[in-house]
Image (tube, coloured by chain):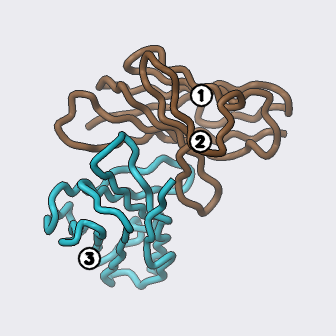
């Protein structure tokens, strides 16, 4: 099946630093990837849609200068949390759609736990 | 963005019991997906549905695409401890790439 990886699995950083999270589709190409944020015991909140070769589409209320997204290849999207603060601490999950897939499915990465001190 | 209504919010059941949960939307969808999420991990796709009325099974799990295209159901038969987790539904309409997610159902199975 389609596999999506994320790196790192978890990260602890100091307030004010920037953190980059990678999302890779391992065995398929993905023109479109999605970045979600999830708080404890809550559902997934879509932050942005990452499009290969073009600008990401951000959901209302998500600061594009705060959460930088780069989708430079068909298998890699990155999310950079700039000048992170404690309120940015959360579980970040990416997902990807298989370009060649005949089915309309979305596959998730394992998530990245970010803790900002 | 739109969020789907999923119920129940949580369930506590005895091992061996059957489980039912559902998801409703105000919009018509063409695709319904059901995921399971274990703590600290990403959601894993369980079942995908593409046609109104479709009934699909995956082991002890059975899901149905509602006739109105505004709802979907997931049933788990003879629950076991490893069924514990949060179950999410997700729906996709005619336009765009985005899937809309349900609020989740937290399942606890008591041995």
At 53% from the left and 53% from the top, the residue drawn is: A44
At 79% from the left and 46% from the top, the residue drawn is: A87
Q: Determine whether, in the image, residue B73 is placed left or right of residue A16.
A: left
- Which structural element holds mark 2? strand
- Which structural element holds mark 1? strand
Alpha carbons under labels 1 and 3: distance apart? 39 Å
Alpha carbons under labels 2 and 3: distance apart? 32 Å
Circles 2 and 1 in contact, beta carbons < 8 Å: yes
Is residue B62 visible to us here?
no
Q: Quadrant of residue B102?
A: bottom left
Mark 1, residue position: A79
Residue B101's x, y, as percent?
44, 57
Mark 2, residue position: A92
Mark 3, residue position: B77
For the colour brown, the matching chain is A
Mark 2 / mark 1, whichever is N-terminal: 1
Residue A95's x, y, as percent?
43, 38
Same chain letter for marks 2 and 3: no
Circles 2 and 3 in contact, beta carbons < 8 Å: no
Q: Nearer the viewer, mark 2 or mark 3?
A: 2
Q: Quadrant of residue B59?
A: bottom left
- Residue toward you, B22 or B91: B91
- Residue toward you, A19 or B92: B92
Q: Quadrant of the C terminus of chain A?
A: top right
Image vertical order of residue A116 relative to residue B20, above or below? above
| Mark 1 neighbour density, 10 Å: few (under 14) some (14–19) many (20 or more) | many
Residue B2's x, y, as percent?
48, 58
At 49% from the left and 24% from the top, the residue drawn is: A77
């Amino acid at each position: 099946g389609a596999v999506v990886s994320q790196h790192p699995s978890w990260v602890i950083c100091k307030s004010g630093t920037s953190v980059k999270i990678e999302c890779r589709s391992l065995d398929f190409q993905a023109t479109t990837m999605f970045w979600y944020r999830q708080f404890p015991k809550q559902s997934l909140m879509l932050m942005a849609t990452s499009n290969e070769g073009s600008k990401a589409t951000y959901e209302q209320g998500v600061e594009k200068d705060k959460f930088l997204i780069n989708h430079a290849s068909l298998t890699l999207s990155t999310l950079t949390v700039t000048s992170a603060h404690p309120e940015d601490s959360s579980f970040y999950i990416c997902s990807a759609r298989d370009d060649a897939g005949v089915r309309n499915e979305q596959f998730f990465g394992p998530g990245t736990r970010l803790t900002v001190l | 963005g739109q969020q789907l209504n999923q119920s129940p919010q949580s369930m506590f059941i005895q091992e061996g019991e059957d489980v039912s949960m559902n998801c409703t939307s105000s919009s018509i969808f063409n695709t319904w997906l059901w995921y399971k999420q274990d703590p600290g991990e990403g959601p894993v796709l369980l079942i995908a549905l593409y046609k109104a009325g479709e009934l699909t099974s995956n082991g002890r799990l059975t899901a149905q695409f509602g006739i109105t295209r505004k709802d979907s159901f997931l049933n788990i038969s003879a629950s076991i401890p490893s069924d514990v987790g949060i179950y999410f539904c997700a729906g996709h309409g005619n336009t765009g790439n985005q899937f809309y997610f349900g609020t989740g159902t937290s399942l606890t199975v008591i041995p």
